[in-house]
Amino acid sequence: MVEIVEDPQMGFESEEDDDELSDGELQEAFAKGLLKPGLNVPQLEPTKAVNNVEGLKKCLAEFKKNLPWAERLDLTNYPAADIVAKAEGRAQQPEGEDVSAEDDFQREMYFYRQAQATVLAALPKLHKFKIPTKRPEDYFAEMAKTDQHMQKIRKKLLLKQAAMEKSEKAKKLREQRKYGKKVQTQVIQNRQKQKKAMLSAVKKYQKGMTDKLDFLEGDQDQRPKGSAAKKQINKKGPNSKKKYKDKKFGFGGKKKGSKWNTKDSHDDVSGFKAKMAHGKGGKHFGKGGKTNKRPGKETRRKMKARK
């Protein structure tokens, strides 16, 4: 029979050699009542709090120094009165009341008011000990960093600035190249378009579809187009062809039915002449109203015979 010894760390009975027990040995130990509920769970004893007052006082006496207040500058006080709440008529928080740690604004205002109260309490004490609280006008504080270190920083900043300027310059050059390529592409496209239009006009002229040779003029593109051309024409005035057509046909307007009689023209008899009406005025031939005095054919024949 194997001797079983209780292991307090494991919480159950085990061998001296810490070997795992077989199923048969566990069954025999359970039948004899050696295994009990709860033995396989480690039970930790609760830690006892030690309040060593004497030791704490001894440690305090070792590092405590009886220095004057001017060397310590320690103050413990409540926050100053809330002037904003007092001016707005709101209820002020009583001294000693706990501040909600979840409210960021309230917590920061508590720190601010406490620092304000500390300054108001410390200034009279400092003046009492004749300790100056303002920096003199000719005071120059010693720099925390050496001149060599500041020179390194200055060089680094200058290098960084030069790199940034170089980068900006390269960026502008890239943009100018892109714009130049765009303009060059546009010029090439315009030239191709002009060439295509000229070839089309030449083909039309060769086939007899047109008799104009305007495509041979090189300054077509330099002529003003659209409203600019109309303004120039208006400035020069109408040409001779336009003047002739205006003189012959008028300046536009209604042409059809312009000679039709109207009620007003029908009632107007101011231009009526009785002598000319119904053929009573006699017939006049020739120019200028003169009558035709040429003799007849028989009379002309007799006149020729007499000669």
Image (cartoon, grey):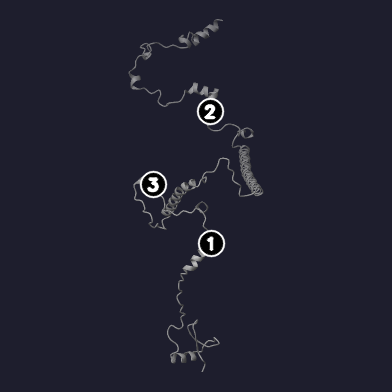
Q: For the point 49% across and 23% down, which residue is it?
A: 246
The type of residue carrying mark 2 is: Lys
Left or right: where 93 falls relative to 250: left
Whole-angstrom CA distance, mark 3 to mark 2, is: 74 Å
Q: Residue 274's x, y, as percent?
A: 35, 12
Q: Nearer the viewer, mark 2 or mark 1?
A: 1
Residue assigned mark 2: 231
Q: Nearer the viewer, residue 24 or 121?
A: 121
Quadrant of the rendered image containing residue 267: top left
Residue assigned mark 1: 63
Left or right: where 219 falls relative to 42: right
Q: For the point 53% across and 28% down, which residue is it?
A: 231
Quarter of the C terminus within the rendering: top right
Q: Earlier in the sequence, mark 2 or mark 1?
A: 1
The type of residue carrying mark 1 is: Phe
Residue assigned mark 3: 84
Q: Earlier in the sequence, mark 1 or mark 3?
A: 1
